[in-house]
Amino acid sequence: MSDYNNKSCVIAGYAIDCADSLPYSLTNIIQMTPLFEKFDVIIAYDESTDNTFELINKFKGNRDDVHLILNTNRLSPLKNINNANAKNSIMQLINMKFKDYDYFILLDLDSYGKSQLNISLLNQFIKRDKDWDIISFNRNNNNDMWALRYNPYFMNPFAWGENYKDVIEHTKKDIQNKLSKLTVDQYLEVASSFNGIAIHKMKYILDCKFDGKHDAELLKKFDIVYNCYIFVKKEFKFQTNYYHESEYVNFYYDAKFKNPEIKIAMSPVNIFIE
């Protein structure tokens, strides 16, 4: 038991067609729970073509601290929109029942969250929570570019049309270069990052919304001329009508808008055993 056992936490994830990875991600959840005196688990799920529901239903059993939510708000053919709807159902339950908890840990239940968590290392970061309000972690050159935004790369890298691969490759090199210069006790300030798991201080994300729609107008908040950008001496045209967005980006933008003082951090440490 951690000496942080007087803390409370909601551990949550979203499941759809991920039966092959659920045994691993559910084990990660089980191993996290002893870090907290009080915890609840929330799993939002969609109807799946495999036995995802059977696995999470077995995981729940008769436990009152595990809550399953069927996502009935699948209004879009776009995966990211439905992902956002499912995660908003998690937030709705949190705002109804768990607003007074200390932490909200959100993790991927699919293949991206399949690796084993280093629970001892995770606990060390929780103990140092004065250094961050929201924190994600490095993934050994496999960072989630879909959810990553940091200065000056606030744009959606996939919204650069035929140039998106060049933009992603450039950004990957830049983020790894920045992280490589940090010690294990330092952090990179970001606008958004996920990488399979993120820890949030609950008070900073209450009433925040996930949204899978890209909004080029958001870029104006960063004083960026978003119709043209320079990467390694190449001029790429940005698609202002691009529709897709990581639901995490808008969630963290919302958190920052509501709480301008919060520290959204990315650690150079990988807490997955890969």
Image (cartoon, rainbow, N blue to C red):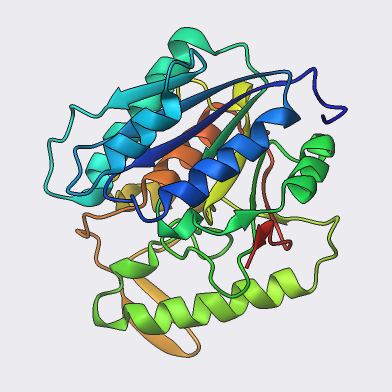
Q: Which of 18 and 233 is in front in this view?
A: 18
- Where residue 211 sits, quadrant-wise, is top left
Residue at 60%, 28% in the rendered image? 259
Give the answer, above or below, for where 161 lies relative to 261: below
- In this rendering, would 113 be left or right of 110? right
Residue 210 visible in image: no
Label tally: 0
Asked if residue 186 shows in the view, the reply is yes
Report x, y in % for residue 119.
Answer: 72, 46
Residue extending furthest toward the bottom:
233
Q: Quadrant of residue 89?
A: top left
Residue 181 position in % (x across, y down): 80, 73
Q: Where is residue 138 in the image (x, y as percent from the top left)?
A: 64, 63
Q: What residue appears at the point 71 percent right and 53 percent down from the top-left corner?
A: 118
Lateral position of residue 238 relative to residue 96, left or right? left
User: Which quadrant: the N terminus?
Assistant: top right
**Residue 82's quadrant in the figure?**
top left
Where is the C terminus found, in terms of image quarters? bottom right
Q: In this view, does 120 lie to the left or right of 50?
A: right
Q: Residue at x 65, y 75 (%)?
A: 176
**In front here: 211 or 29?**
29
Say which residue appears at 56% left-offset and 59% top-offset: 115
Tell me residue 197's x, y (percent): 56, 48
